[in-house]
Structure formats: C-alpha cells, structure tokens
Amino acid sequence: MGQPNILIFMTDQEQAQVSFPGHPCKTPNADRLAKDGVLFRDCYTVTAHCCPSRASFMSGLYPSRHGIFNNVNTHTAINRDLNDGVVMFSEGLKNAGYNLAFSGKWHVSNSESPCDRGWEELHVGARGERDPGHPKMDRFRPLEDAEGPRGRGQVMRPGWGNIQVYGTSKQTYEEMNDHKIVHSAIDKLPELVNDDAPWCLFVGPNGPHDPFIVPEKYATMYDPDEVALPANFADRMEDKPRIYQRHRKQLWDQFGEDEYRESIAHYWGYCTMMDDLFGEMLDALDESGAAENTLVLRMSDHGEYAGAHGLYCKGGPAFREG
C-alpha cells in the first residue's frame, strides 16, 4: 500500500473531556474514531496557548526551543517569529515525496505562512502577516456598546470593554467559516487521493474557541438547567497564585450561576458542531477509498476551562481541565 496518508483534524480550545465516554457532550464521530483506534486520555499540551502549542506540534520542540511563547499577532507578542533553524515536520514530509494541503488556522508565526513550510494553502486563517506594524486581530476589538452596562453572556474585561462570551449566531451551519475550512479540505481530497504520491491534509477549524457563538441548532442543543457545574466550581483558589484568583474575581465572577450553565451549554454545542464537521471529513475520507491507508489524528491545540474553578478560556492557570 505504500507510505500511509495522514489526515490531521485539529480544533482550537477543545476540552479533552468532552470526547471521553460518559460526558454529556455528544461527539459521536470522535467516539467512532476512538472505537476503531486509540483514545489518549493522559496527554497534555506543552502550554495552554494557541501559538506556542501549534509551534510545538509543527516542530516537535518545546517553546524554549522554538521561541514562540504567546500570541504572535498582537502587540503583546514576546516573539513574533520562530527561532532560526527551527524545522517543521511538513518539511520532512515534503522531502519524502508527500503532497501537503493546509486548510484552517495557522497561528504559528507572524512572518511565515503554511506555504513557507511546504503546504499548499486552501482556506487559511491567522496566517503570517509579513507586517512589522503589530497587526491587531479583529476578535480582540471591544463591542461598540462597551461603555454601557454588561449584557447577558458578557463580561467587562478591563481595557477592552464588554466581551460577549456566548450567544446565538445569525449564521447557519453552512455559513460558518469553519464549514468553509472543512469543505475546502473535502474538495481537495479527491485530487490528493488520485495522485500517486502519499499525502498529508491538515484541517484546522477555529472552534470551539471563545466566544461560544453558534447557530441556533447548537446554541439550544443542551438545556442549561440540566448542566451540572464543575465539581471544583466552589474553589476560590485562596491557596493558589494570585493570578488565578484575579482571573476569577475580575472577570468570571461577573457571571451568575445561570450564566455559567448557559455558557457551558453553548460550549458543548460548539464542540458538537466541531464533531459534526469532523464526521463530514471522515465520511469524505471513506468515500474516497483511501481510509484504509490513512492515519487520522483528531486533537486540539489546548483545552478550555468551561467553568472549572470558575474560570474560562486558558492561559495563566494550569489545571487539568485546561
């Protein structure tokens, strides 16, 4: 059969537990893959932050070696680019005769894009800006009504105004950008399969990264009244570093318990949407006839607290939930 093909499906900020047996979140396609493969329950990201984690995945190096420590596309970047001499696995595959295609979130370097490391670019986001002027990403802009009182599902973030954490999108499933990302990969698959060379296809949707704003089907999929708060929700973290306490007290204590439950329900809906997209990718792989000779990797760059310890997102704290 020759060299195996490789399909990589990497979500963003997906808590590992949502795909574990018995979790309330529905992920039938991840379950399908785990049933036929291996489910890793004790793997940890090198750091709970998009850019350094992705750089480590691509290079096999710790952040101390590849040089990326935080978001490369904002003014807070410690380093915008990888250290000199860092090599990525894609370059090795390219040299070995693989065809490479990349669809989705890059977020590894501010000056480089997937094409600089051997990939054919399909529908790529968070790619290198090649701009020394410290570009600011749109998702960090405060809402226009930032000076007003916070609304439901919002937190007042110091310096940024009101940030909407969860809600219902006006877009349909098919209109979401992640749908475009996955279907760009699906459209490319027949071309890859019909070539004699082995291939590696990277598919990287943006979900379920905050904000948890999803089509109505997913926003209403889980009943907030049936969402149990995490077992450690009452932890005030008095025995932990002050930064942990500050994250909770400054931001997330603005939520009432009903908003915690609503936000978790929206997050689970977002994770199920990612699983539906993954299912479409698996179906396309089966239909292509290449599944038997394809290694499928399903992962996320890091996790999400989703209310554990009263926290959200990722970053400073380093609990297992992340």
Image (cartoon, rainbow, N blue to C red):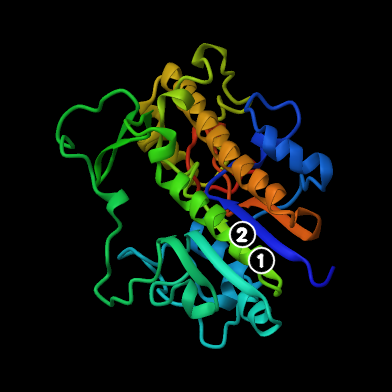
- 288 vs 305: above or below: below
Query: Is residue 316 shown to the viewer in this render?
Result: no
Q: For mark 1, what is the residue? A: 194
Left or right of 205 in this view: 130: left
For the point 82% across and 39% down, the residue is 35
x and y percentages locating residue 242 in the rendered image: 47, 45
Which numbered marker is on residue 16?
Answer: none
Left or right of 92 in this view: 2: right
Query: Is residue 125 shown to the viewer in this render?
Result: yes
x and y percentages locating residue 91 in the rendered image: 61, 80
Q: Secondary structure at mark 2?
A: helix
For the point 52% across and 11% down, the residue is 225
For the point 67% across and 76% down, the residue is 98
Quarter the N terminus occupies:
bottom right
Q: Amino acid at mark 2?
A: Pro
Front-most of residues 16 and 149: 16
Q: Secondary structure at mark 1?
A: helix
x and y percentages locating residue 47 in the rendered image: 58, 58
For the point 38% across and 67% down, the residue is 77
x and y percentages locating residue 247 in the rendered image: 43, 41
Front-most of residues 138 and 44: 138
Q: For mark 2, what is the residue? A: 190
Left or right of 124 in this view: 62: right
Q: Residues within 10 Å of mark 2 (few under 14, many from 20)?
A: some
Quarter the C terminus occupies:
top right
User: Decide: marks 1, 2 in contact (CB < 8 A)?
Assistant: yes
Q: Residues within 10 Å of mark 1 (few under 14, many from 20)?
A: few
Q: Amino acid at mark 1?
A: Asn
How many numbered markers are drawn? 2
